[in-house]
Amino acid sequence: MASLLQSLVGASEKAARIAQLCRQEEALFSLLIEEKTGPQRNRRFLRDFKTLADVLIQEVIRHDVGKEFPELQEHIQGEESNHFENGLGETLEVQVGLTQQDTAALLSRVLDRNQAAAELLAAAVHQEVVVSDPALEAAALSIPTENLAIWIDPIDSTNQYIRGRGDVEPVDGIHPSGLRSALVLIGVYDRRSGEPVLGVINEPFYQEELQAHRWQSRYHWGMAYGGVTLSSLGKPPSQAALRVVLSSSEKPELRQALEPLYGLRFASGAGYKMLCVALGLAEAYVLSEATTFKWDSCGPHALLRALGGGMVDLAGALRVWRAGQRRPLPELTYHQPVEGATGAECWANHRGLVAYVHREHLEVLLDTLAATKML
């Protein structure tokens, strides 16, 4: 398991470098943000390059981890399909080639023969990333890899990744928007039980080096299996003044129910809000809508479990709470699609969620929401 964890962290670091490259290099950034007008306008291009950045990062993680762990190759899933239609109407399969030249040739076709952009991306895909971290090497937890599967969210909070600024000031440590909320999320779960067992969260835009015009990344990891927990983070202390982080688009009724007892904070990106809980910047993240997916929550969920917390199905937890049941509460699982749903909705967290570290905070929150009868 230590070697799998090292592989996932290394893959997340390479993914972070690709995400950084697309923001830092003018040849790529112009593709990321520019939408041509007039006769030169390609209405698909802006959307397509956003998608390509996501797909490429996803396929790099799939390639690098699958190469080291062939038994997992067919069990690595992501948000994006790797089939991509370029501006010439060609449908291409985005994948990592045997050599840097092979990858550049494929990406050149995807990018309508933009060779400069293709070569920049191919070099990032084939770079060797070495992570020197004694804590990673010392992580000892035995989980049979043949029972595992992986969810990838290559760039969570894509809109902030494309348009977000790097200088958004935090409010009580939480960045309400901007590049800080764009994360790489990797989660490993048990295929039999659906429980998340290992998670990696990478912050590609953790800190900007202004003079060098580049970004520094930061990663976090957590493992929880068979009663054993390990994490790169320490468990945040329990706070008396409770803070809940929400989406700015959350239901007004939910906000009104929470406001009398909680300090409400708002942020972009589901993964970022979950990370805020793991870091102790908020005691809980509450979402009442079906707007997150298994690839959003699997990695953060594993990290929260490693810290003694978790992520419950909100509607399910309220139902059993109102019936007087206190343990166990239904946690999110990752192995079964939503019955009757199609497409991406198969993998939605369709009944909302609550992310938490301290059980007592979850109980106070459920008491508050159960009394409102609004959910």
Image (tube, rainbow, N blue to C red):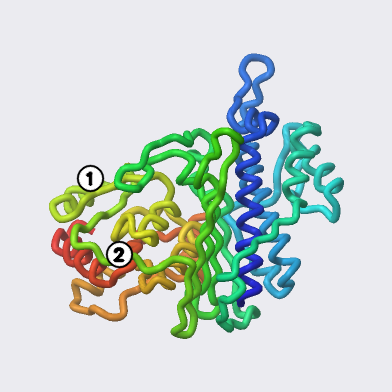
The residue lying at 38 percent from left, 43 percent from top is: 175
The span from disc 2 to disc 1 (Cα, nearest Å) is 17 Å
The residue lying at 62 percent from left, 27 percent from top is: 43
- Residue 58 shown left or right of residue 70 in the figure: left
- Residue 362 shown left or right of residue 215 in the figure: left
Residue 335 drawn at (x, y percent): 52, 71
In the structure shown, which secondary structural element does the residue marked by tag 2 occupy?
helix
The residue lying at 31 percent from left, 75 percent from top is: 329
Residue 252, labelled with which disc? 1
- The answer, for residue 307, to whether it is visible in the render is yes
Residue 231, labelled with which disc? none
Residue 315, labelled with which disc? 2
The quarter of the image holding the N terminus is bottom right
In the structure shown, which secondary structural element does the residue marked by tag 1 occupy?
helix
Q: The residue under label 2 is which amino acid type?
A: Ala
Depth check, front residue: 254 or 214: 214
Number of numbered labels in the structure image: 2
Kindly indicate the quadrant of the structure image that contains residue 274: bottom left
Residue 106 drawn at (x, y percent): 81, 44
